[in-house]
Amino acid sequence: MRYSALSLLKNALTGNRDWQPAWRQPAPKPHYDVIIVGGGGHGLATAYYLAKEFGLRNVAVIEKGYVGSGNVGRNTTIIRSNYLLPGNNPFYELSLTLWEGLEQDFNFNAMVSQRGIVNLYHSDAQRDAYTRRGNAMRLHGVDAELLERPALREMLPFLDFDNARFPVLGGLLQRRAGTVRHDAVAWGYARGADSRGVDIIQHCEVTAIRRENGRVTGVETSRGFIGCGRLALATAGNSSRTAEMAGLSLPIESHVLQAFVSEGLKPFIDCVVTFGVGHFYISQSDKGGLVFGGDIDGYNSYAQRGNLAMVEHVAEAGVSMIPALSRVRMLRAWGGIMDMSMDGSPIIDRTPIDNLYLNAGWCYGGFKATPASGYCFAHLIARNEPHETARQMRLDRFERGYLLDEGGKGAQANLH
Ligand SMILES: Cc1cc2nc3c(=O)[nH]c(=O)nc-3n(C[C@H](O)[C@H](O)[C@H](O)COP(=O)(O)OP(=O)(O)OC[C@H]3O[C@@H](n4cnc5c(N)ncnc54)[C@H](O)[C@@H]3O)c2cc1C
């Protein structure tokens, strides 16, 4: 069923009785050409592009909860491609380009809003680093502008420019960055994949991976054994657990990251702003709530909730940047499980097991990557060849020493 202004009108006039479910609830088949474990953004996008771009339709996505219950429905919705390293930048730019056409492509309103992102700088050294990053972006054909203090003051008058400890000197702006309604992305990809024949099997947990003669033959699940020709893992925060089922130990630690939403306010912040001296980022949703977040909680966990110390830490950073936040009431908070890789960059690669593929290590930046991750992972699974923009996202880079250390924040997950 295609959504359009006409279908909206027709259904409104006929009592909204003819809408079809956005996707089916199929029983698992005994065997699929490809099984994707994880019905988050990346797993669903992979299934969508496998069917749409590579003609593979005998595909199942197996999800232990419901679609959107993982990080895809828990993040702070920021998309951008303001990366420095050549191993990352073209990939995230591909993603941003796909975001720009996504709603038309999968015929679903995901509220893609290119409202821009400003990364604040607070020292000369930081300005130099941002200038370098902006120049690298422009060399890759990506938009970037360095804003000096007067321009920034006009654009974001509510910032604490004269903060004695952290004066705001300027910012790096990417106008094409922005926000997307996160759970609608999962729904749009699920609907698009389902309509092309992909089975989305919810409430079905993969508990073991069966192997014969070194190859994966299928997965044991809470709904029985399901066979497959190729198995793809896209389980984000649970990547270490699912990979372990195939005997793989990943260079990934799982940590909690929290998100926060304030009470609804009149329009106040019309772009995404990030603090340069604390880890804090904020935007305002269309409903008026301020959506913000900060650091990971800093201890290993598989719980989808965080601790109070980080609530305080994030609130402090927010008030340092925007003093008016001290008068805003916080309404909701939740946590998601982050798959923190040791260099802060992801893995989209084959594994030492012939027909097992891995998509993991997204840290706290995987939402913006969803379209490109799905596209490149589908390319890898279908052709057994990495997509050119994801060539450096290899699993063996950690033992070979070719890290993609984008943040420059060290190789310790806790320090990202
Ligand atoms: C609070 C927070 C804020 C964030 N903010 C941003 C942001 O602003 N911008 C950005 O780019 N990124 C952000 N991220 C990161 C981003 O959300 C993730 O990197 C990305 O969503 C991970 O990919 P995914 O959508 O596939 O993960 P998920 O949605 O977590 O999908 C993985 C799925 O695998 C399923 N699964 C796990 N184990 C099994 C099993 N054994 N059997 C079956 N299914 C299984 C899980 O139930 C889950 O649904 C944020 C994350 C959090 C938590």
Image: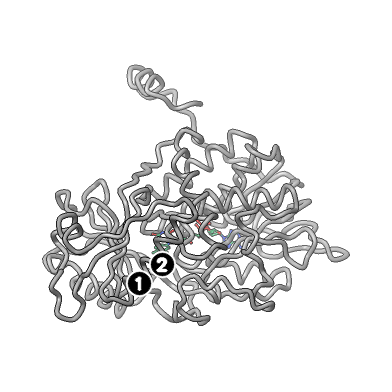
Nearest the viewer among 333 and 88 is 88
| The furthest residue to the right | 213
Tell me which corner region of the image, top left, top right, bottom left or bottom right, holds residue 327: bottom left
Numbered badge on residue 15 = none
Q: Residue at x 61, y 71 (%)?
A: 240
Q: Residue at x 65, y 78 (%)?
A: 401
What element does badge 1 sit on? helix
Quadrant of the image containing the C terminus: bottom left
Numbered badge on residue 128 = 1
Give the left or right position of residue 358, taking residue 161 as reference.
Answer: right
The percent position of residue 284, horizontal first and vertical second, equals 25, 53
What element does badge 2 sit on? helix
Give the left or right position of residue 117, taking residue 51 as reference.
Answer: left
Please give the residue where the numbered disc 2 appears in the rendered image: 132
Label 2 sits on what residue type? Arg
The percent position of residue 108, horizontal first and vertical second, equals 44, 35
Q: Within 8 Å: ligand 1 and the Cβ of disc 1?
A: no
* Residue 151 seen in render: yes
Tell me which corner region of the image, top left, top right, bottom left or bottom right, holds residue 391: bottom right
The percent position of residue 162, horizontal first and vertical second, equals 13, 73
Q: Residue at x 68, y 44 (%)?
A: 59
Tags 2 and 1 in contact by the CB under 8 Å rule?
yes
